[in-house]
Image (cartoon, helix red, strand yellow):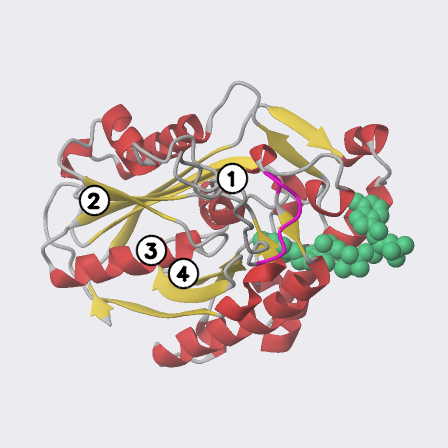
Amino acid sequence: MEIPYKILGTGSFLPELVVDNEMLAKIMDTSDEWITSRTGISKRHYCVTETTSDMAIHAASNAIEMAEMDPDNIDFIIATTLSADYTTPNMASIVQAQVGAKNAFCFDLNAACTGFVQALDIAMRYLNTDERKTGLIVSSESLTKLVDFEDRRTCVLFGDGAGAAIVSNRQADGSDLPEANIYESFIGADGTGGEFMTGKAFERANHPFIPEDMVFEPDRFGHETGKYLSMKGPEVYRFATTAMPLAVEKAVERANLPLEAIDFIVPHQANDRILQASAKRLGIPTEKMISYIAETGNTSSASIPICLDKEVRSGHIRRGHTLVFTGFGGGLTYGACVCIF
Ligand code: UT7
């Protein structure tokens, strides 16, 4: 697709409390050495008073400030999360009210860690219709709500945070963008791998008309960790190191670009070893695969926009760079988008 668009602004928010590996090693049977060597994670941020919606509002406000735009000009908000504060109102509507984007329609999307990539893809398709001019994507996750601190195999990996981006087919002042830009994507899923990462929403139906002697089928996925997240790490690892490079290759091919034309890949931050292995599989220098995981751990759908915002604000990613956003996660879901910053 040759859509005239621009990423007008980015934003992020990380809660104040920083928990490093040593702090975790004091409360469970783990070590800085194990976590660093297996994942590349040094620390992560944990919410205390902050909520998922609070973080989303902060990240969205930062992006609006960078875009120097009037929130009235935001036409839609897509929020991504698997750790929302409410099932209703959706997080996008909470953000809309707080940032004053009164003309925006709002919905939430849950594609686990692939959420930002899928939201960006939907946003681009709205922009392509020329009816919806400006979209805010905001991804926020409080994964500390979901992880079991008795389970060292998962809890050391995750953290809390939010990121946002504003995409538009207009300038912030409403005038037309001068030129077309390249945008392509490749999005996929493999529902047969659903059991590799599960988190429970609500319990089954519980109403007065259920017979007392009713025997229920076992859980579809054999989810045995109650309200907590359950993950088969090595299986997810294998999926990630195949699906992510595949999605990148397909998206870049659709954009009709050689891989060398990509300045940076901004991937879902789950494990530095996954990033290194994916770079190797793609045959690209590891410097092009941006890793921010040491600072944040895995923040699910928020990880890509947090990483993007940090790199933009540090000046590492600049205007004109060709980027690939790529993610994978529960579902199993995966995908990649090629776009120009
Ligand atoms: O957003 C997507 C989310 N998920 C992912 O991306 C996860 C992908 N998977 C991974 O990143 C890796 O599989 C992990 C980092 C989760 C685990 O690394 P691994 O090399 O696959 O380790 P493992 O699960 O095979 O466990 C190896 C050993 C086990 O001990 P034994 O059974 O060999 O004695 C674990 O009990 O490491 C042990 N272990 C730990 N030791 C110290 C597991 N967690 C810890 C821990 N500290 N936190």
| Cα separation between marks 1 and 4 | 62 Å
What range of the chain is rendered magenta? 221-228
Tell me the SS state at disc 1: loop
Which residue carries the number 4 mark? 321
Checking the image for residue 212, the label placed there is: 1
The quadrant in which the C terminus is found is bottom left
Q: Earlier in the sequence, mark 4 or mark 3?
A: 3
Circle 1 crowding by C-alpha within 10 Å: few under 14, some 14–19, many from 20: few
Measured in 3D between alpha carbons, the distance from the residue under mark 4 to the one under mark 2, in whole angstroms, is: 25 Å
Image location (x, y in percent) of residue 340: 34, 61
Element on which disc 4 rests:
loop
Residue drawn at x 50%, y 50% is 316
Mark 3 CB in 8 Å range of ligand 1?
A: no
- Discs 2/1, front: 1
Where is residue 142? Give x, y as percent: 53, 34
Disc number lying in front (1 or 4): 1
Quadrant of image for the N terminus: bottom left
Measured from the top left, where is residue 141 in percent x and y?
Answer: 49, 38
The residue located at (11%, 59%) in the rendering is: 130
Q: Residues within 10 Å of mark 2 (few under 14, many from 20)?
A: many
Outermost residue, top direction? 49
Residue of label 3? 120
Separation of residues labelled 3 and 1 (CA atoms): 47 Å
Instruction: Work out whether residue 67 can be spotted.
Output: yes
- Look at the image and say whether residue 223 sits in the magenta stretch: yes
Q: Amino acid at mark 4?
A: His
The residue beneath circle 2 is: 76
Look at the numbered disc 4 and say if its residue's Cβ is closer than 8 Å to ligand 1.
no
| Residue at 55% in and 71% down | 243
Judged from the image, the secondary structure of the residue bearing numbered disc 2 is strand
What amino acid does circle 1 point to?
A: Glu
Earlier in the chain: of badge 3 and badge 1, it is 3
